[in-house]
Amino acid sequence: MARCGTRTSFLLWLSLLLLLYSEGTLGCASVVVGSPIVPLGSAVTAACTIQSELCHVLQRAKVQITWMLDNEPVVGSQHQGLGGMEVSNLTLPQFNQTQAKLWCCVEWNGTKQRVGMAEIRAGYPPAKPFNLSCVLNLTDYGLTCQWEQGATSHLPTSVELRCARSRGPAVTGCTPEGGRSRCTVPRRLLQLYRQMEIWVAATNALGTAESEHLYIDPMDVAKLDPPALHTIQSIPFQTDCVALAWEVTRSNAHMELQCELRYRAPEDPAWALVTGIVGQAGTTQCCGFLFGTQYHFQMRCRRSSAQGYWSEWSPGRNYTTHEKAPTGKLDAWWSTQLAGAGGWLEVQLCWKAPQRRQANGKVLGYRVTLSPRKRGRDPPSVCNTTHTHCNFSMPVGTRRVYLSAYNTAGESAATEVTLMERKGQPLARMWAVPGGEFSLQVHWAAPPAPVTAYILEWQRVSSEPSHCSACWQMEQDGAATAALIQDGIEPFQQYNISLYPLYKDTVGVPIYTTAYSKQKAPSNAPKLHLRSISKSSAELCWDPVPVEMQNGFITSYTIFWANSTTEVSSASVNPSLSSFVIRELKPSTLYKVHIMASTAGGSTNGTSLTLVTTVLDDIEVQFLFLTLGLIFALLMLLLICFHKNGQVKRQFWPSVPDPANSSLGKWMPAELQEEPLQVPGVREPGLATISTVTVLERAVGKQPPAWSKEPTIESTGTFPALPQPYVRQEGPGALGRGRAAVQPCRGPGGSEDTVQYARVVGDGYKGQQHAPPRLYLRSSSTQPLLLDASPSPKPYENLGFHRFHGTALHGCPGDDGCPDDLPATFPLLQGLRIGGDEELHDCRTF
């Protein structure tokens, strides 16, 4: 089934194609337009007619006609005509395309089929040609005419050149090819020496346009061939004149001609023209030429009795006139200085090369002498050079030098140069303005005294100044108040200008000014540098713009600054300054800063500088650092004090031994331990511990050591009733520790007893229930000796207690006596340990 459907569709398409013409229309359909070519923007009408009985394929369905203009659908009206025809009419109110295709379509099998087409073109009538001109070429006598076309018409247009003889019909003279606007009328259609009518006609489907008619005799517009120059030579005895020989071509030999001659030197900006040369051939003579100068000559001709065209200029010929000796005076300028103590002057002499009219040829060199040239002999030269300046020495008394120029024809008359001093009266005022892009106009106030001439000097201002020997000129008119400088002036460059008045006997002191011939924005702006910054201000500095990059006079610098909130501020700075202080800034804020340099010709921005204001000012920072330094010093002092705690304490608060913490305190007899302890008064807590007690033993019959000045204790049979205290305990000191003093105990008669045993009971801390510390010493009589441990009234006795050292003192456990196993002879007191590591040294103070 699918194949059958496909075959049926294919057959229907094939039948439709067979019914179509080769141009894509059905034989039963036709499209007619009102006009295939219409003016651009006008209305277009069209009708499409379909005969259904002739279109068998379309008989089965209702015919629906539609329109398309190129690929765009347009709407028309459809109705049924006579004989069962279907007709659709279309009206386009405004046709704005220069070319388009209008299609008539029908709906068939669900698609639009194109059954008819008409092509429509739109445009304008042809424009009128203008500027018609013709030239007759005497080589082939063809009349070539050219013109200009008007605006395009967008339609195919035919153009032809028409001509008519006197009393003859108009004919087509020629037709341009390839769309060009020129063509040539052949000789057979021309009528020479008779007036003819010539015009251009342009035609298209919308009309015809003709140019203005030209009435001319073809010979009146003839263009001759150029003549030929044969010889050029100087005329003897008239050295500024030359004679030229010339002739015309054969085609122009029968005509009366009018010719012109032109010439110029390579340095001349324009040609010099010689007119009124008449004839067909011959010679002509011209005068007023410069000596020793090369000239280029050319010649052209035309008919003398007509207003025809000039021939082309002939091929040029060069000729150089002969030379003669230079004439005129040379402008000179000088500077002098003493050359040591030898009586000589160093002279720098400059001069201007003579003008062409004075040089009379090529100058070969210049000569400077100290005396004038006399007949028959030449003075010796101090300078002979091809340059326009030289340096030489001469005696101090010499006031004049003589300058001359020479060429191949001879030497000029000497110019006398008087070397006057520069001490005359200066001018009152001078100023300069641009005279053009490459010149400066200098003005000055009239001098109070008569002036013979002026000297103008100028020098380009540069970071590396160089001497310019040619940058000067002389103004010979003493009454002048202005001068134009043109030599070496360039735009955007600064020049220093000096003006010297030349008086009769002296040279005036110069005055100065600076100028630009043209200004523009600086090439670069200065680079900003931060000199200092605080919390509310910042000082900026910059280097001036180099003079080569200024491109004009700096009128001002403008500083711009902005923070992150786009608050932009600016300040104008005098160009003579190179620093600026920005004030009223916000603390700890980031700012973007840049500088702009301005001249009369524009402004240029510099690169941006980023800066951040500080939180504190310098004084506040110094005060903060001083405070931190003091705090740091105090902390270091406290650390040292804590680290050296023991030494500091010993220096300011010496340690007092606590007998209660000594080894003797542990051997207290039982009776003493049972004794009621007296509670001391409330006092500051502190240790009163005795660290070490040392007993020194002295043999019988030996003398006490030399360092001991105190009497010794000798052994006796019984203790005295009230012995002197051997140890005294002082109350709490600055550190809260008890202090003890040891003094020797003497028996009756001052004899010294041998001490065998000792017991020390020391003070405790505040609030402890201890008895007052006592020291018990055991002698050979086996009776303990009680030493009072009450504080000594003398501070040195307590302090001296620290100087004992030696072996530890052993104590007896009770009042019943010492153990039997102890030696019969116990070492004499050597040292006493008090609570810690302190030792008592040296008992000489007791």
Image: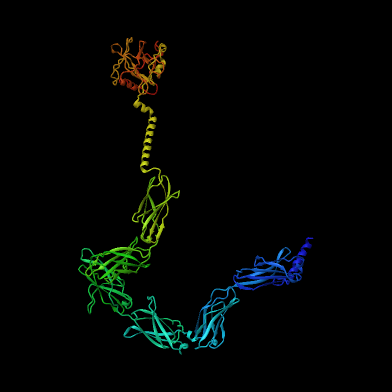
Q: In which quarter of the image is residue 304?
A: bottom left
Q: Position of residue 34 (x, y in %)?
A: 65, 73
For the residue pair 724 and 547, the one nearer the viewer reads as 547
Q: Tell me if residue 198 comes above or below residue 507 in the rendering.
A: below
Q: Is residue 70 left or right of residue 131?
A: right
The answer to which of 686 and 335 lies nearer the viewer is 335
Hey, which quadrant is residue 741 in on the image? top left
One can see residue 626 in this view:
yes
Task: Give the image location of residue 711, x and y in percent.
Answer: 29, 16
**Residue 604 sits in which quadrant?**
bottom left
Q: Which residue lies furthest to the bottom in this view?
A: 254
Comparing 494 with 811, the one in front is 494
Residue 137's spot in the image, x, y percent?
50, 84
Say which of 452 and 268 sits in front. Answer: 452
Quick check: 829 above or below 442? above
Is residue 173 left or right of 16 when viewed as pictured? left
**Position in image of residue 90 (x %, y %):** 66, 68
Question: In what quadrant of the picture does the C terminus appear?
Answer: top left
